[in-house]
């Protein structure tokens, strides 16, 4: 928090008594409690301040769950181990929580996600506040770790739509993103080949949002071209998780 810019030295020759309100002091427990009450009730603070505080809380919770999953999730631990075996270390700091376009996510925009892989810096960004369960965050981390594994193992060229499509097929197929319950929550329901339908649809959506993809028809064509080989490729798993 920045210091109060209106503070000025006293004109009195005597030294002022120390006070909790001094600009360099740490807020007292009461001041912290009062600030929290203001943020919860909205009294004395702006809407922007309340939203910023909520965002920071969501990011802290996301970071806490991320650490728990990295320490205890068999799926996440398995993928991290195979990344190390492939020569790619993944420090905890390379998987981080931050603010995302929450309005796009809430509107169900096809280009919006609860997380993303950033190949340029070998990092995964998770969207704080956009996970409806611990399992949702687990499958999101797993999805992005599979992209990271593909990058490490196969040197993916993300501007090559066939490469991108293959990694998206694998990530959606192997991460748990297309579980039946997840599809129901998204509003999709199918009696026949529900898993394959989900994997294909989500892969097409992701490839469509690649800046070098001219249109959805191209994304569909590319996904169909690599479908058989990439859907059957379950590395580093023996079978679909």
Image (spheres, rainbow, N blue to C red):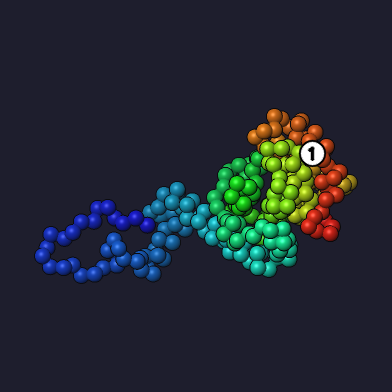
Which quarter of the rendering shows the N terminus?
A: bottom left
Q: Quadrant of residue 41?
A: bottom left
Asked which secondary structure carries label 1, the reply is helix
Badge 1: how crowded within 10 Å, few (<14), some, or many (20+)? Answer: many
Residue in the picture at 58% in, 64% down: 64
Specify whether 123 is left or right of 153. left
Task: Say if residue 16 shows up in the picture.
Answer: yes
Left or right for 52, reference 181: left
Front-most of residues 44 and 183:
183
- Measured as percent of width and height from the top left, residue 209 is found at 67, 37
User: In the image, residue 150 lies at what x, y percent?
Assistant: 72, 50
Q: Position of residue 54 (x, y in %)?
A: 51, 55
Is 73 in front, or is 91?
91
Q: For the point 80% across and 55% down, which residue is it?
A: 235
**Residue at the front extreme, as displayed:** 87
Q: Quadrant of residue 129?
A: bottom right
Residue shown at the point (76%, 39%) measured from the top left: 162
Q: Is residue 104 left or right of residue 194?
A: left
Q: Residue visible at 40% across and 52% down? A: 45
Q: Position of residue 27 (x, y in %)?
A: 35, 65
Q: Quadrant of residue 29?
A: bottom left
Give the quarter of the figure containing the C terminus: bottom right
Count the marks: 1
Residue 83 in the figure: left or right of residue 199: left
Q: Residue furthest right?
A: 192
Q: Residue furthest left?
A: 13
Q: Is residue 159 above or below residue 47?
A: above
Can residue 110 be seen here? The reply is no
- Give the answer, above or below, for where 202 lies relative to 176: above
* Tag 1 residue: 223
- Is 71 rendered above or below residue 217? below
């Amino acid at each position: 928090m920045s210091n109060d810019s209106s503070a000025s030295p006293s004109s009195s020759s005597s030294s002022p008594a120390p006070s909790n309100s001094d600009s360099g002091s740490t807020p007292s427990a009461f001041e912290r409690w009062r600030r929290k009450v203001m943020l919860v009730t909205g009294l004395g603070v702006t809407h922007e301040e309340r939203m910023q505080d909520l965002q920071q809380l969501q990011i802290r919770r996301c970071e806490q769950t991320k650490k728990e999953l990295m320490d205890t999730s068999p799926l996440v631990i398995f993928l991290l181990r195979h990344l190390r075996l492939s020569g790619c270390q993944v420090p905890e700091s390379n998987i981080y929580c931050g603010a995302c376009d929450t309005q796009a996510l809430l509107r169900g925009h096809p280009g919006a996600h609860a997380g993303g892989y950033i190949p340029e810096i070998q990092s995964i960004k998770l969207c704080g506040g956009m996970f409806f369960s611990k399992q949702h965050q687990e499958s999101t981390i797993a999805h992005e770790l599979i992209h990271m594994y593909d990058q490490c193992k196969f040197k993916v060229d993300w501007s090559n739509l066939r490469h991108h499509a293959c990694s998206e097929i694998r990530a959606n197929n192997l991460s748990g993103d297309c579980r039946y319950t997840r599809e129901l929550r998204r509003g999709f329901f199918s009696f026949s080949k529900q898993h394959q339908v989900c994997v294909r649809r989500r892969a097409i959506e992701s490839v469509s949002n690649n800046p070098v993809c001219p249109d959805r028809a191209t994304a569909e064509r590319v996904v169909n071209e690599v479908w058989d080989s990439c859907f059957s490729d379950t590395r580093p798993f023996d079978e679909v998780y």
